[in-house]
Amino acid sequence: MEASAVAWRAEGLLFENCNCQLVCPGHMHFSQFCTHARCVGYWAVRFDGGSFGSVPLAGARAVIAYDAPSHMIDGGWTEVIVIDEAATGEQRRAVEAILDGSAGGPWAVLGRFVGKRLPTRFLPVELVDEGTSKRARIPGVLDGIVTAIRGRDRSQPVTFGNIFNQIHAATQVIAAGSTQYDDGVIRVSTDKTHGLYSRFDWAVESA
């Protein structure tokens, strides 16, 4: 059965960092021009629940790194998916299908802009939730953190509300991120630049 014919649902934690200043114009809409000539960054995905057909997704982790033009809607992105090597073979295939868009859903929309998709890699992926900070680590490849910025009421995060985004929840916590990432093709080096995190809930009914 093709991935596009499988019913699936996934929920969990999603966070990101790119080299744009707060806030990434491309995050608001791909038709906006990003801060620099290239927008480079990553999304980190921790699956806390859901299933792909009969395959449970809880416990799977992945990072998607990208290099895109300033005007992201022009397409031509370079992208790579890195899936935690601890995932089972079935989970690896399911997560790859979700994140490369072949299973439909929100990542199929983003996939339209990818001009060069690098081969999926399977490496140790560590994603740590420290409350107002989220950390991502792939030994020898990625070391990143996003931390919520402080608002007037320091007991509450600064958020976007009612914002349309394909992969994030409607409410997102605004953060600053610092990242060092290098896989030999995509390179990201940031310090206190655009960051976000939210919960996600994606679903696709069978064809």
Image: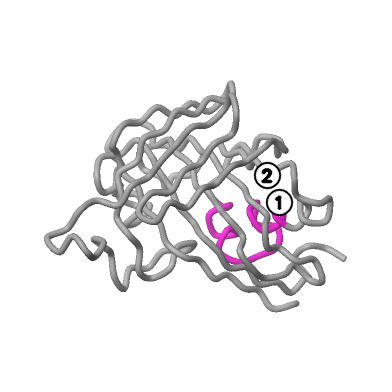
- Numbered label attached to residue 33: none
Q: Is residue 99 magenta?
A: yes
Magenta: main secondary structure: helix
Q: Which residue is mark 1?
A: 96
Residue 136 at x, y percent in the picture: 51, 41
Residue identified by numbered label 2: 83
Between 11 and 153, the residue placed more toward the observer is 153
Label 2 near label 1: C-beta < 8 Å?
yes
Residue 103 drawn at (x, y percent): 70, 62
Q: Is residue 183 above or below residue 172?
A: above
Which amino acid type is marked by label 2?
A: Ile
Q: Residue at x 45, y 63 (%)?
A: 168
Q: Secondary structure at mark 2?
A: strand
Residue 123 inside the magenta-drawn segment: no
**Residue at the farthest top position:** 184
Span shown in magenta: 95-112
> Which structural element holds mark 1?
helix
Q: Residue at image x 27%, y 63%?
A: 159
Q: Earlier in the sequence, mark 1 or mark 2?
A: 2
